Amino acid sequence: MLAEPVTKNPFTSYRRDSLGPYCEPVTVAEAHSGVLAGLQVLIVEDDRAIGSQLVKGLARAGCEPTAVATAAEALQRSGAGLILLDLGLPDMDGVDLCRRLRSRGTAPIIVITARGAEPDRVDALDAGADDYLVKPFGFAELLARMRAVLRRTGPDSGATTYGALRVDPAARRVWVAGRPVALTGKEFDILACLAIEPGRVVTREEIFDRVWDEHWYGPRKVLDVHVAALRRKLGHPEIIETVYGRGFRLGEVIEDPSHR
């Protein structure tokens, strides 16, 4: 496993304010809050201090960030709309983890690392990374690169639109009347299952087969709990209709221009 050069400060410029020593002024993040709002970001960074500062900065940018310090933790997570991946991890080389993450999903992966040599860049990009950023870097540049990869996998790339609802399976993002909605991994998977054929009744058995592991033997009422949470977060209970004795289907919600 390759050791990664020590980089205590991943950002090229910073100030000591409420976000901590590694983040640029708040206005840099706040300027783009509407673009990244609700995006679930998984940060895989073994330096917990750096991971913490990334969490704070991205939260200010409107994201929903989560930081983990090992490859094992990263592989247990699901539902991220974008992944920031350090290469110097304690339990697996980051390039190998990148390859495994790419085989499991299509969420954009941006490598953030102190390894700047061309072979490292080539290996990571060939393993499935969408972009490569060498530490130290500017926080504004990180946000710009995040926006760029999201444009390439954005809401026009295979997204399903049904009335005011828009579901993008590639980026794992959801909008209602143009407003981004943050969902958990299971909530998104259930909604995406219903969005495959909007208006068609999807049985409870189909949803369990698609969303839950075949070895899962928990209570079946867990589906109703997730559906209730989905209705609440989407802001329109009628978006998910219950067809008693059968399952669920998407109901079309027409956008009200007065609520934009």
Image (cartoon, rainbow, N blue to C red):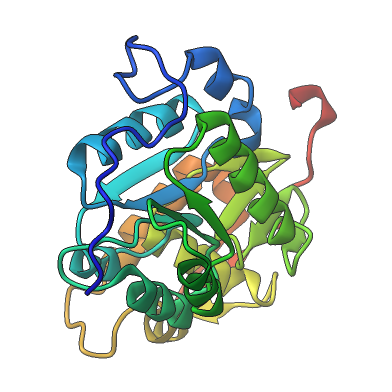
Q: Position of residue 49 (x, y in %)?
A: 21, 35
- Which residue appears farthest toward the top when viewing the image? 17
Task: Tell me the quarter of the image containing the C terminus.
Answer: top right
Residue at 40%, 85% (x, y): give it. Answer: 205
As drawn, 139 above or below 95: above
User: In the figure, 129 relative to 210: above or below?
Assistant: above
In-image side of 55 versus 28 (left or right): left
208 left or right of 5? right
Q: Looking at the image, which is closer to me, 111 or 54?
A: 111
What residue lies at 23% left-to-right and 63% top-to-bottom? Answer: 3
Give the residue furthest to the front.
117
Say above or below: 118 vs 149. Answer: below
Q: Split into 4 quadrants, where in the image is the N terminus?
A: bottom left
Q: Is residue 247 visible?
A: no
The residue at the point 28 percent across, 41 percent down is 51
> Residue at horizontal 59%, vertical 64%?
130
